[in-house]
Structures are given as structure tokens and as C-alpha cells.
């Protein structure tokens, strides 16, 4: 049981941070462990609603790889990956849209409403928010896997100014009207830059960036963008962490002051990062 005096001290500690962040936009990439259980979903939703109520404008970008693969298998279609990217034929693209827009996006919106907030889910196709082209290169045709060409923020800003917390599903649209599957980490970095966000926050399944992936005690608390780039170029950052760090570096290069890699396994990790003296995870800055 937390004593009343301790509760008061926690609020007082948070006050300067609330003042600092009020009125700013923050992009949260929702994924990993934070998407697994209803308990984790409620924790994230509560954090997002709290941000809204203290005057911060949070925007959520989400993926959903494991759930896409699960539904594909249920439908008798085996997922195929090349260099970590899902081969997305026409049928797979339909499943991707079904899962991202119809299931995961709506599920998060429901949790936000239950936590006392107002939310709406949009696809990157809505308002041509994410304009994409077919991703080229490599020996294998990845199908409807896309690269972002432009980010149009008009729809997002209109909904945000109307008081809605916007949840973006990372489906891009081509100039020819084709739908494209966009990596959610990449999309989050591009959207954060386009919105001139104060922060990009990426929820992951690890405490942050580890110098030794086998040792959680090797957490890097703060990293300059140039050092992060060197680690990427040298191959020190591999696997699923690579696109997350690339997204953070991209966001910072586009003018976002700071990007954070947070442990989505921790309840209320967003609040701990933003409103406490210590913070959690890894921060990448200019």
C-alpha cells in the first residue's frame, strides 16, 4: 500500500515534466510485449489517456506481425520471410489489412475508451497519410511490401485537434491505389519526423539497447545519434532491434529531439520514462 505522503511526492516529482511536455506531440510505436496480454494493453492505454489529460498529444503507430502470422496459419497459409521481411502476396495483403486495421487497431481503441480516453483508428491509406511504393531490391520479390515516399499529416492533425487519440495502422497506399505493407518501426520514425514530434517512443521486448544482447545489465542508457549510426553500420545491432534503432535514428535525423527504446514488458513504462527523474530504457539524441 502506497502511503499518502509517497503519492504526493510522486506527483510533485512529475510536475516539472508535465510542464515541460504539455502541448507537445509524442509518437508511440506500440508492439512487442505491450500487445500480448489484456493486462499490458490496459497499462499502455492508461498511460496514453494520462498523457492526453495532462495536455500531451500522443499518437500511436502499431504493427502486428505475430498476429498476422497466426491468422495466416489458421487460414492454411504459411508465412514466408526473407531477411526478416514478410513476403506479401495479394492474399497475404488482405490478411495484413484485416489484422492491422480491423483487429489490432480496434482492440487498442477499445482499451483506450475503457481507460477514459477518446480514440480513433486510421489506416495509412486514409487521407493518403502514408504514400508508398513497392520496395525493390534483393533476389526475391516481396510482393506488396512498401517503402514510404511521403507522410501527409492533415488527417492526423485534424483528429488530434478534435480531441481524439489517433491510432495508425501501417498500411500504405501507392499512387496506383495499391495497398502496401509497411514496417511499423519505419513508419513510426517517418511519422514522428513529419509531425515534428518532441519524442518517438518505441516499445520493445527488451530493456532497451544492450551492448551484449545476452546481458540485460549491458543496457545503454543514452546514445548520440552518430554513435547509433556507427553501431548500425558496423553490424553491432542486429535482428529485431535493428529496425527499431534505425527508426529512432531516422526520427532524430528528421528533427525529433529524442527517441526512446522502452521495455514494453514493464507496466507503465511510458509514464516512468516521461514523468520520473530516473527514466527507463535507452535514449537516442542528437
Image (cartoon, grey):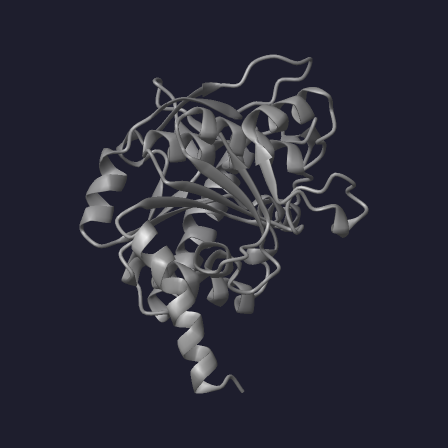
Q: Residue at x 71, y 42 (%)?
A: 210
Nearer-the-camera pick, 88 or 210: 210
User: Residue 116's quadrant in the figure?
Assistant: bottom left
Q: Position of residue 155 (x, y in %)?
A: 24, 38
Q: Quadrant of the N terminus?
A: bottom right
Q: Residue at x 34, y 33 (%)?
A: 125
Q: Is residue 236 visible?
A: yes
Q: Position of residue 94 (x, y in %)?
A: 48, 38
278 vs 132, left or right, is right
Q: Position of residue 29 (x, y in %)?
A: 48, 45
User: Residue 153's quadrant in the figure?
Assistant: top left
Count the marks: 0
Of all residues, the one furthest to the right in this rendering is 214
106 vs 161, left or right, is right
28 vs 282, left or right, is left
Q: Is residue 120 visible?
A: no
- Residue 203 sits above or below residue 85 on the image: below
Q: Position of residue 128 (x, y in %)?
A: 30, 29
User: Residue 54's quadrant in the figure?
Assistant: bottom left
Q: Residue at x 42, y 42 (%)?
A: 199
Q: Residue at x 44, y 78 (%)?
A: 7
- Residue 170 sits above or below residue 120 on the image: above
Amino acid at each position: 500500500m502506497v502511503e499518502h505522503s509517497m503519492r504526493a511526492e510522486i506527483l510533485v516529482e512529475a510536475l516539472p515534466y508535465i510542464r515541460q511536455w504539455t502541448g507537445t506531440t509524442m509518437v508511440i510505436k506500440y508492439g512487442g510485449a505491450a500487445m500480448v496480454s489484456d493486462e499490458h494493453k490496459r497499462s499502455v492505454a492508461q498511460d496514453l489517456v494520462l498523457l492526453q489529460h495532462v495536455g500531451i498529444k500522443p499518437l500511436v503507430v502499431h504493427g502486428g506481425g505475430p498476429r498476422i502470422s497466426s491468422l495466416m496459419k489458421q487460414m492454411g497459409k504459411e508465412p514466408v520471410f526473407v531477411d526478416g521481411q514478410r513476403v506479401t502476396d495479394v492474399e497475404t495483403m488482405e490478411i495484413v489489412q484485416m489484422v492491422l486495421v480491423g483487429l489490432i487497431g480496434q482492440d487498442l481503441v477499445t482499451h483506450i475508451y475503457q481507460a477514459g480516453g477518446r480514440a480513433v483508428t486510421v489506416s495509412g491509406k486514409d487521407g493518403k497519410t502514408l504514400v508508398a511504393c513497392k520496395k525493390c531490391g534483393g533476389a526475391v520479390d516481396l510482393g506488396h511490401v512498401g517503402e514510404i515516399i511521403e507522410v501527409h499529416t492533415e488527417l492526423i492533425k485534424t483528429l488530434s485537434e478534435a480531441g481524439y487519440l489517433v491510432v495508425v495502422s501501417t498500411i500504405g497506399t501507392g499512387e496506383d491505389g495499391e495497398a502496401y505493407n509497411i514496417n511499423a518501426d519505419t513508419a513510426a520514425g517517418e511519422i514522428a519526423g513529419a509531425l515534428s514530434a518532441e519524442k518517438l517512443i518505441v516499445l520493445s521486448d527488451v530493456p532497451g539497447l544492450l551492448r551484449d544482447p545476452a546481458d540485460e545489465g549491458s543496457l545503454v542508457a543514452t546514445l548520440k545519434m552518430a554513435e547509433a549510426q556507427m553501431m548500425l553500420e558496423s553490424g553491432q545491432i542486429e535482428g529485431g532491434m535493428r529496425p527499431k534503432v534505425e527508426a529512432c535514428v531516422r526520427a532524430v535525423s528528421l528533427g525529433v529531439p529524442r527517441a526512446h527504446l522502452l521495455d514494453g514488458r514493464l507496466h507503465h513504462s511510458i509514464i516512468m520514462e516521461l514523468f520520473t527523474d530516473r527514466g527507463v530504457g535507452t535514449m537516442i539524441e542528437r
